[in-house]
């Protein structure tokens, strides 16, 4: 049984807009590939031909072709007086990654809050003979206190970066300036 790829038809202004975006230097390579897929599909190329032309995987070509077609169809079927005008931001939003991709957080919000609160306490209260926290010391204190079973220095730094806690120094023995 043969499968048929979703047909993509672009009006002149949308085609011109995508060509304009494609010529920009500031656009990331992955977005360029997605736009090239849409334009090539509009020109009637099959997924395998597009994949070969741009050195992409066939299933990736099909994914972006379908996503564009679905978003464009929904946009066209919406009330013309209410729908947003076709522009660069809208086109790129249709070709953006879906939210929720990537690795999920290992720590709960309350754990992150408790780790951030540790930096407000003195390291001496936790048995460290120093006056300033480092990421390594905070990680050890969080484990000792039972907030988490394990945590890396980098993760502590990421947590603190999102809070208002003062910056910490690496475990090099140097004091913050």
Image: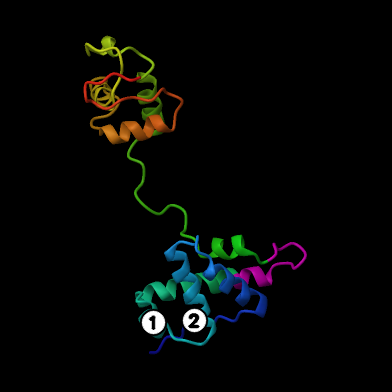
Residue drawn at the location 47% of the way across and 68% of the way down: 32
Asked if marks 1 and 2 touch (Cβ < 8 Å), the reply is yes
Q: Which quadrant would residue 3 be assigned to in this image?
A: bottom left
Q: Which residue carries the number 2 mark?
A: 40
Residue drawn at the location 39% of the way across and 72% of the way down: 60
Residue 6 appears in the picture as rendered? no
Q: How is the image coloured?
A: rainbow
Residue 36 appears in the picture as rendered? yes
Question: Which badge, 1 or 2, is on the more N-terminal residue?
Answer: 2
Q: Which residue carries the number 1 mark?
A: 53
For the N terminus, the image quarter is bottom left
The count of marks equals 2
Residue 170 in picture, x, y percent from top left: 27, 27
Residue 39 in picture, x, y percent from top left: 52, 78
Give the secondary structure at mark 2: helix
Residue drawn at the location 23% of the way across and 30% of the way down: 149
Residue 75 magenta-highlighted: yes
Q: Residues within 10 Å of mark 2 (few under 14, many from 20)?
A: some
Compared to residue 128, the image places residue 112 above or below, namely below
Q: Nearer the viewer, residue 134 or 81?
A: 134
Residue 49 magenta-highlighted: no
Disc sitting over residue 153 in the figure = none
The part of the chain drawn in magenta is 72-85
Q: Nearer the viewer, residue 6 or 1?
A: 6
Compared to residue 89, the image places residue 20 above or below, namely below
Q: Residues within 10 Å of mark 1 (few under 14, many from 20)?
A: few
Residue 59 in picture, x, y percent from top left: 37, 75
Q: Viewed as shown, does residue 36 lie left or right of 160?
A: right
Residue 110 in picture, x, y percent from top left: 40, 28
Compared to residue 40, the image places residue 80 above or below, namely above
Q: Viewed as shown, does residue 106 lie left or right of 127?
A: right
Gap between marks 1 and 2, in whole Å?
A: 10 Å
């Amino acid at each position: 049984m043969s499968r048929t790829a979703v047909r993509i038809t672009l009006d002149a202004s949308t085609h011109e807009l995508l060509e304009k975006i494609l010529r920009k230097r500031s656009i990331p390579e992955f977005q360029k590939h997605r736009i090239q897929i849409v334009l090539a599909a509009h020109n009637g190329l099959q997924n395998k031909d597009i994949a070969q032309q741009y050195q992409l995987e066939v299933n990736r070509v099909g994914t972006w072709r379908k996503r564009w077609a679905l978003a464009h169809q929904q946009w066209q079927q919406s009330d013309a007086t209410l729908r947003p005008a076709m522009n660069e931001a809208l086109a790129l939003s249709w070709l953006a990654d879906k939210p929720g991709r990537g690795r999920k957080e290992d720590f709960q919000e309350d754990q992150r809050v408790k780790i951030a609160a540790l930096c407000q306490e003195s390291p001496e209260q936790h048995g460290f003979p120093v006056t300033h926290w480092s990421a390594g010391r905070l990680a050890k204190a969080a484990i000792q206190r039972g907030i988490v079973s394990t945590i890396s220095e980098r993760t502590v730094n990421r947590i603190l970066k999102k809070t208002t806690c003062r910056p910490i120094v690496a475990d090099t023995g140097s004091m913050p300036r």
